[in-house]
Amino acid sequence: MTGSRIAKIIVTLFFLGLLATPLVLKRMAGAHDSRKVDAQTALARHGFYLQEVSHAAGVNFVHHAPVLDHKLDAIMPEVASMGASVSIVDFDRDGWPDIYVTNSAIGSKNALYRNMHDGTFKDVAEEMGIADVNQPGTGVSTGAVWGDYDNDGYDDLFLIKWGRPELFHNDHGHGFTRVTDQAGLPPWINANTAIWFDYDGDGLLDLFVGGYYDETIDLWNISTTRIMPDSFEYAKNGGRKYLFHNLGNGKFEEVSAKVGINSRRWALAAAAADLRGTGHPDLFVANDYGVSELYFNDGKRFHEVGQKTGVGFAPKSGMNAAFGDILNQGKYAVYVSNISEDGILIQGNNLWVPKQGTNGEALQYENLARDFGVELGGWSFGAQFGDLNNDGTLDLYLTNGYISLDHNRSYWYDFSKVAGGNSTIIGDAKNWPAFEGRSLSGYQSKKVWLNDGAGKFIDVAQSVGVNDTYDGRAVALVDLWNRGVLDVVVANQNGPLLIYKNTVAPENQWIEFELEGTASNRSAIGAQVRLFWNGQQQVQEVSGGSGFAAQNDRRLHFGLGKNPHIEKAEIRWPSGKTQVIDNPAPQQLHKIKEPA
Amino acid sequence: MSTPSSQTPAPARSKPFFHLDNRYIGPAFITCILLVGHLSFGILESYQKTLLAIVVAIAVELALGRIFVHKWLHPASAYITGISVGILVRSPAFWPYALCSAISITSKYVLRIKGRHLWNPSNFGISVLLFLAPETVASLSIQWGNYLWPMLVIWVLGSVIIWRLRRFHITAIYVASFVLFAFLRSWMIGTPWRSEIAPITGPMYQLFIFFMITDPKTTVRSRKWQCIVVFLIALVEMIMRLHQIVYAPFYALFIVGPIAMLIEILLDSRRKSSPHQAGMPHITAAKGTT
């Protein structure tokens, strides 16, 4: 055999090896797939399992999508694909978390599920006056966030809409009064996200609202079909952003331009946290059809630093913003969900982790979603960090699925055909082929990523009982029944509200904090608890809205693992005050009022 | 993609003020596309991935060239393959970039008949990867904005360069065929005609029409047959589009290109065995060895 022939054989084998590489890698990745097991096995293996109990809990809520102007009929499933949301609030201050969910068909009703303390809930939205909020001519609900804007001790409701935004004052848990007009809110915003936060530290909650569709568009009476984004990844023809500064007399002043927030990207999610330890909450905005925006807050003005910090360079389809100290280092990572569809569009979700050695004004992030194993989640929507098995590290719950219609026919071909085209084509709804009952990334399996604490997340969704394939939108984490575990509430588009009741291995301990501001805003939104135990620390912050169209319980929940020794809890209040609690007892909810 | 190169030597004339060897036109053009795309839209998620694709393509080319041709080959062709992979492959992982480049270049040395390789290297690599690793790999689609002016720049520059390389007819016939078939599809299935035209206004197609289908080494030699083959590529693409295959152009070229090459090789060998037999017109072979 000649040398040349041997070389040919070797190179041919090398070539075959190259061709086989993707299959080998796929097989190796498949070895970690989550498999269905029984509850006891899940408990033993992962330290928890989830059981869907909505019906048993008396919750039979089903979300209905809006039907917009008939000129959009051909692509109605796409343009009306959002609106399901969930937020947690203890509206009557009875010490048991309640659930508020939005509906989005004209004439449909939102629901406020009062916790009956016995494992069940009762919808009291109607009697409280916050059910019938989707009346013709006023648009429909797309989200809700709760915050005590007047510091009277009861969380008030800001209702996000494609339509007339609404502010409802909580009348000491006995009902709600519409105060939109007095507050000075604009007549129409097509928004999908809003958060309460005290950006200027004056003790009054302010309100950020991120527009999606342009606010001049009434989606039920459009004059043109040119309402779509003019680019799939660089669009700047979305809704404007609003920052409503709380003036303290029930009125708000819109100050976004004055403080440096000028954007017409298509915002889908926002969250605020003090990322640099300045005492001022920074603002993260995840945008559809474009880059994310990160606004550093100096207490008076915002400075957009998306590109500088690394989070605003590669445009994707941002649909979620959630913070979590995933490595117990006292620093927040940011999770942004995007779109991944096999062979068509692999954006990958982003897990923005602070780069080693960067902080303060020089803070920079790197996307470690792939390294941590939380990159691919289908058409991802809402996600939240929380310690689901109380082992002391934050896990990640992600819901997904865009449009589930016909199981066997996909719209992806037509979607990709138009999405890559020229702006004059993509920007006009009449150029988009009709859906005709097809699915688009529908019937997707959810992700419950368990954090091993060493930089890897493993998907255990199927193992721990999360088997639904609804079109998930919003996720909220909450200890619904005061048991020291985080339950999961999921709002699905055109689908039922799901309540996953959590059962956690009893040897894993926990601690919870319920904070109440005095000098700070009374909801304590922005207050930070840094817990030190067993030689490690974890930081969490009370949030006025995070994830996608969601708000977790304001109570902070820390898993501690086995045999914890808690050294201290450091609380930094939005007012700037710090408070240290030495050796707080585990297995308890600690109710703490800001010291005078 | 391989280096576009002229089929006949340019006639002797006075040396222009700025002269660029044809061998460098392709690399220069595609580098321009990359820079325009990245500086205006940040199409590269990371420089490292594109760099990896280029480095692997050149390294494999040099190694295999050394083994089979016993010399260090000029890296221009591999550079274009690598940079094309870097632009067209979209994956959050690094390995697809390296793998795609390696498969692309190696295919030139393994899948050969009568001394000619059949597939356009990057078309082969990308098609194989899209088929075998769809969970990790997609192709460039939406990442270059949806605006007209970057496309205009590419169309003008690309047309001038392709004209100079005497392959403009291939691009022109393909574009005309695509548009014709787009209207036909729209009429047949009742979709908005603009949605059928949309793909060719996107960035993926610009690389496809200026680089892949014009690659001298994997296109037939006769000008007439080049036109027929590229029309057939557009036709097969249309049939695939009717079956809603997202990467129809890549797969159409993947199928039609090698068949055309095989027929030409077959006819060539028959011509050699009977020198007086008439066959496909024979035009000067493409320059370069890959």
Image: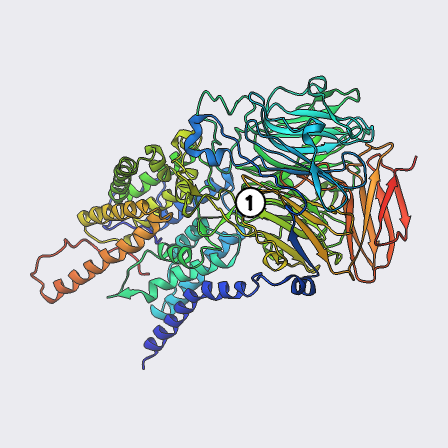
Quickly name the residue at label 1.
Answer: A338
> Quarter of the image holding residue B241?
top left
Asked if residue B158 lies left or right of residue A42, the reply is left
Residue A197 vs A585, above or below: the answer is above
Q: Give the image location of residue B113, x and y in percent.
A: 25, 65
Front-most of residues B3 and B45: B45
The amino acid sitting under disc 1 is Asn
Front-most of residues B282 and B261: B261
Residue A577 vs B93, above or below: the answer is above
Residue at 73% x, 26% y: name it.
A176
Asked if residue B231 lies left or right of residue A586, the reply is left
> Quarter of the image holding residue B169?
top left
Q: Residue furthest left?
A: B276
Residue at 30% x, 38% y: name it.
B189
Front-most of residues A22 and A320: A320
Residue at 55% x, 44% y: name it.
A338
For disc 1, the chain is A
Q: Give the image location of residue A258, x and y in percent.
A: 69, 23
Front-most of residues B134 and A466: A466
